[in-house]
Amino acid sequence: MLDSVIQKSSPHFDARPDPTDISLLVIHNISLPAGEFSTPYVDRLFMGCIESSCPASLQELIGLRVSAHLFIDRQGVITQYVNLLDRAWHAGVSEFEGRSRCNDFSIGIELEGTDSQPYEEAQYHSLDKVTRHILDKFPKITLDRIVGHEHIAPGRKTDPGEGFDWRRYLSQLQSLPD
């Protein structure tokens, strides 16, 4: 687990087939309901607690078993739901460089946002910080092995979308001291 982040234990994870093969970082976005921020529903989704009293637009999520390793809200607050050494259920049907089942070898970070809205400065700051930690801890993850959900599930997923500034994010990582 990471230090200085909110720790929660999602029930939606399992053991990786090979925990020494963590070699991909996947950036996602999520907002529940779509386009609404600072609601309790992302947390409830990852914790398996979406109830029938939720908004009608979220009814299809009841019983869905998904998670991410990390969630970064609009203020830059980081919540860890799954230990980085375990397999979170974030990528779904996915493929990277000819290899399927990306959950087996990736770490998933969800940014509170939408495809089209710009992300907040605080989110980039927290994402930079946590990515640096991940790069240090998992040397098989390199800058060219940081992708969006849209890259590993094209046609099915579009996040983090046009609102995410890849150039800014990767440039910041290249400028961070070792």
Image (spheres, rainbow, N blue to C red):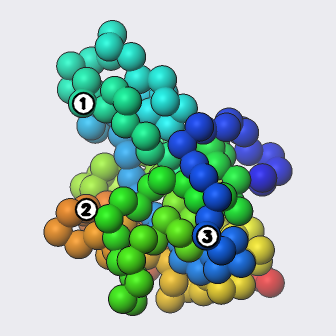
Residue ID at (41%, 84%): 99
Q: Is residue 153 above or below residue 58?
A: below
The number of discs equals 3
* Quarter of the picture holding the C terminus: bottom right
Pick out the residue farthest to the top. 53
Apparent side of residue 25 relative to residue 85 in the rendered image (left or right):
left
Q: Position of residue 14 (x, y in %)?
A: 60, 52
Residue type at mark 1 is Glu
Q: Is residue 144 above or below residue 47?
A: below
From where the camera sits, is residue 108 visible?
yes
The label nearer to you, 1 versus 2, is 1
Quickly name the residue at label 1: 60
Q: Is residue 142 above or below residue 56?
A: below
Apparent side of residue 25 relative to residue 59 in the rendered image (left or right):
right
Kind of element beneath mark 2: loop
The label nearer to you, 3 versus 2, is 3
Q: Quadrant of residue 129?
A: bottom right
Q: Which comes before the other along the chain, label 1 or label 3?
A: 3
Q: Which comes before the other along the chain, label 1 or label 2?
A: 1
Q: Which comes before the other along the chain, label 3 or label 2?
A: 3
Q: Residues within 10 Å of mark 2 (few under 14, many from 20)?
A: some
Apparent side of residue 9 relative to residue 66 in the rendered image (left or right):
right
The circle on residue 157 is 2
Separation of residues labelled 3 and 2 (CA atoms):
25 Å
Pick out the residue farthest to the left. 155
Quickly name the residue at label 3: 17
